[in-house]
Image (tube, rainbow, N blue to C red):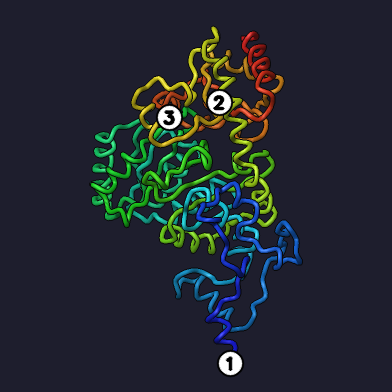
Amino acid sequence: MTDAIDSVDTPTPRRNPKPEAKTIGGRELKPSTLMMGHGYDPVLSEGSLKAPIFLTSTFAFENSAAGKRHFEGITGKRPGGAEGLVYSRFNGPNQEILEDRLSIWDGAEDALSFSSGMTAITVMLLAFCAQGDVIVHSGPLYAATEGFVAKVLSKFGVTYVDFPAGASREEIDAVLEKAKAQAADQGGKVAMVYLESPANPTNALVDVEAVQASRDAILDADETPIAIDNTFLGPLWSRPLDHGADIVVYSLTKYVGGHSDLVAGSIAGAKKWMDPVRALRNTMGGIADPNTAWMLMRSLETVELRMERAGRNAEKVCAFLKDHPKVEGIGYLGFISDPSQQDIFDRLYTGAGSTFSLFVKGGEEEAFRFLDNLKIAKLAVSLGGTETLASCPAAMTHLSVPDERKAQLGITPNLVRISIGIEDPDDLIADFAQALDAV
């Protein structure tokens, strides 16, 4: 019996029994270096250089006392979560290695993986919201996110207040004061400030630092986290946790996965914000499966290379499109015309990314003609893959958004969202040129 208790007091390591070096000679190792092996010890898997895919539904406990202790963590009777592997709805080696590596990119204490970006978003919102609560969010959001807040959470007595992505500190203050009063009237709290920056599909930027200052002045920072969808520029060109956000959200399907061959999502932040979401994920499910987690680990090794190449390509392509006679405008972060947006970009971002909005002269008919004549770029939704993709949000991803709301947010029928891939940039320019000739 003493042996069993002793073995629980010193938990069996899950992935790597040795402290991992994150510095060499006083130099802090870069994320791109750590992606090659962080969180994994080949000794634990027969010397396999890469982590195997652990296709199992459950894990054997070293003894009964350990099993009890793991479930004390899972059920919340003891803080900190399970100290070992338990059941694949809760955790698994591939998922835990992935989560360790995701947290490195954003400088987060903890991270959680999910079966899709929307699973990450919905489980997170449900974990923090209760009847009578209010969510404050920027606009536009990805249509499914906005729809979940407005149409699903409303069924459970959760309301929302929103503000445009480029709002000033004074405008944000007014919205948070309104939300605070609304929550008091409803007997709830302001459960979360949820941001998306750059916004989908307009590339409008939110001043995260201003949002944090406003939240800290008006609301309880320990009660109301700031979460931000960082899919468009993260993890390479944007680190929102460094600028005042508490939780960073990703559709890993996009740049992190990067090959248009998987669907997954994640959140990352301080453990105090991750723990309630983990507890709800344990109950609801929605964790990324082992194969998807393994593929994401593979993709993280090249995410910096892919994003840098796509970013250089986008800069060259946008320089061509910017002054084209059949282009009305371009929403590319390398060519910002609004001084306030430029100020946000200069303070909070290190790159312009490779996804932008192109406004074709005309309306839906002209946008469709452009899309239908593309030869290299694929007519498909999503973004951040190795291939170039183009779509018409007003008629596709944001079709469910009311027309009045689309007009308010600048999601016009002639807006084409383009995600540049890693093809030869001159070939892409030739493709866009001939497609515009057909308009």
Q: Nearer the viewer, mark 1 or mark 2?
A: 1
- Depth check: 213 or 178 in front? 213
Mark 1 vs 2, N-terminal side: 1
- Disc 3, SS: loop
Is residue 308 something one can see in this rendering? yes
Q: Alpha carbon of mark 3 to alpha carbon of mark 2: how far?
A: 13 Å
Residue type of the residue flagged with mark 2: Arg
Task: Return the mark for residue 1.
Answer: 1
Give the image quarter of residue 168.
top left
The residue under the point 55% across, 23% down is 315
Mark 3 vs 1, N-terminal side: 1
| Residue lying farthest to the front in this orientation | 25
Please name the residue that numbered disc 3 is placed on: 204
Residue type of the residue flagged with mark 1: Met
Q: Residues within 10 Å of mark 3 (few under 14, many from 20)?
A: many
Please name the residue that numbered disc 2 is placed on: 417
Residue type of the residue flagged with mark 3: Ala
- Depth check: 243 or 291 in front? 243
- Residue 220 percent across, percent down from the top left: 27, 54
Are dots 3 and 2 in contact, CB under 8 Å?
A: no
